[in-house]
Image: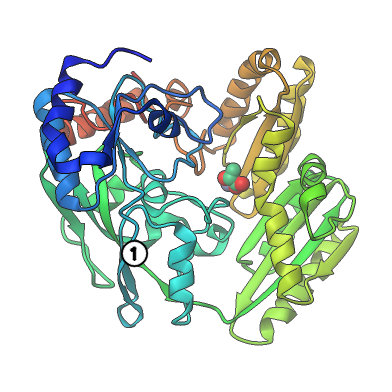
Amino acid sequence: MHARTKALETLLVRLNSRFGERISTDPDELAKVSGDESGLPKGNPGAVVWPMATAEVALVAQEAQELGVGLVPRGAGTGKAGESIPLGGELVVDLSRMNKILELRPQDLYAVVQPGLITAELDKAAKEHGFMYPPDPASWESCSIGGNINTNAGGPRAVKYGVTQRYVWGLEVVLAGGKVLRTGRRSIKGVAGYDVTSFIVGSEGTLGLVTEATLHIIPAAPVVETAWLSFADPVTASRASEHIFAAGITPRMLELLDTTAMDVVRPKSAFRLPPAGAAILIECDGRDEGVMRDLERVCEIALARGATESAIAQNDRDREGMRRARRLVSGSLKEAYPYKISDDVAVPRSKMPDLLTRAQELGAPAGIKVAAYGHLGDGNVHINLLCKTADERELAKPVRQEVLRLAVSLGGTVTGEHGIGIAKRSELGFEQSRELIELQKRMKLAFDPGGIINPGKALPV
Ligand code: LAC
Ligand code: ZN
């Protein structure tokens, strides 16, 4: 651990009377806020503060600006690209205690929430009114809304319902220096001025600290049907999925698991995953028995296009078992391959077979095993380079660069849902022009001229 800077010492003295036990330099507390779920090395927080209200966040931002101390906003620490890893003795602003639903207004189609709210809690609360909050990152039982907003998180349901940005109507954001900015609206429509709300969504906490969000909720489809389709290999699964879309069916979930993903999950799964080279977890939703007809049609199409088996969930227990198997993949792969490199490239859907085939080919010469799973229906699949040792990880790094370049060459992106963070700062240039990156740097300066807010993230040096 580094020695604390004079500026941070002064900041701690100034904030102490307000925060008391809610500000800390205790090494155990700092250890808890120094990393995330990216697999990147832990960072170096100088201190951590737990605000309970917007005014407290504003006070922190004001004092930090005066003293030139960096701030790192933090939610549940489930990020996959290092957005919340403090790089150089910053004050971590842990927003997990600001976790309330402030308003829930189904009649107006919105909820107002604090950033520390666990994502699934909002969906659960909306459900009591027959509504849903669609974004459902695989980690939605542990990740929080603020982090979802900062990364513009997706999730399995995005294939039908879209990602977080679509549901953010307005934000309250504490800016560098402590001013409180409100963006957006609570009406269904609103086009006044630039869309600053959407600019902040996905900005990885580098423009300000989100302290409140007005989020769109929608009526929940009362009928959901789920099936598990088995295939010989991921490319066949991918081609079959194209035929499902071509039939005019938009499932609300279309997720891929390859054989490696299934192998690591199998021992923990209540649902018995049939042995296969690949599987698709698919769900359709709607209002009536037409949903089951759609799902049966999906199974017919899949079987005609190479599926070896289809299993329709007979009840909610089956359904939950299938979903859980999917949600377990990331963590289970990590346990089996602790040094794995996990990516979240996205490509146009029709290019998925190319991505899947060529990613395998890229891994082979270096002896790196490649797994693929995730949001097949979005063209956003997690290509994982499976490494058991640090040495293997070194071998995999150049392969990873090639996978990212491949995705861009297919018309896609280096990150479909996890963000740049510190994981892909150098690789943003694979995808974006110098002009575009420079423009974004000027926009960052307009928000945060002193470079106080989440320094070192999202944009290249
Ligand atoms: C998932 C995470 C890794 O889809 O994005 O499981
Ligand atoms: Zn994902």
**Residue at position x 28%, y 46% in the image:** 199
Percent of width and height locating residue 288: 63, 87
Q: Position of residue 192 (x, y in %)?
A: 16, 61
Farthest bottom residue in view: 288
Q: Nearer the viewer, residue 168 or 391?
A: 391
Residue 334 place in picture, x, y as percent:
67, 35
Residue 253 drawn above or below residue 398: below
- The answer to whether 154 is drawn above or below residue 429 in the figure is below
- In the rendered structure, the answer to whether residue 282 lies left or right of residue 219 reads right
Q: Quadrant of the N terminus?
A: top left
Based on the displayed image, in which of its 4 quarters is residue 457 positioned?
top left
Q: Amino acid at mark 1?
A: Leu
451 lies above or below 214: above
Q: Is residue 265 visible?
A: yes
Q: Secondary structure at mark 1?
A: strand
The quadrant where residue 61 appears: top left
Position of residue 275 measured from the top left corner of the image (x, y, whole percent): 90, 51
Name the residue rendered at 73%, 80% in the picture.
Answer: 292
Which is more toward the observer, 47 or 372?
A: 47
| Residue 46 located left or right of residue 67 | right
Foreground residue among 447 and 238: 447
Q: Which residue is mark 1?
A: 215
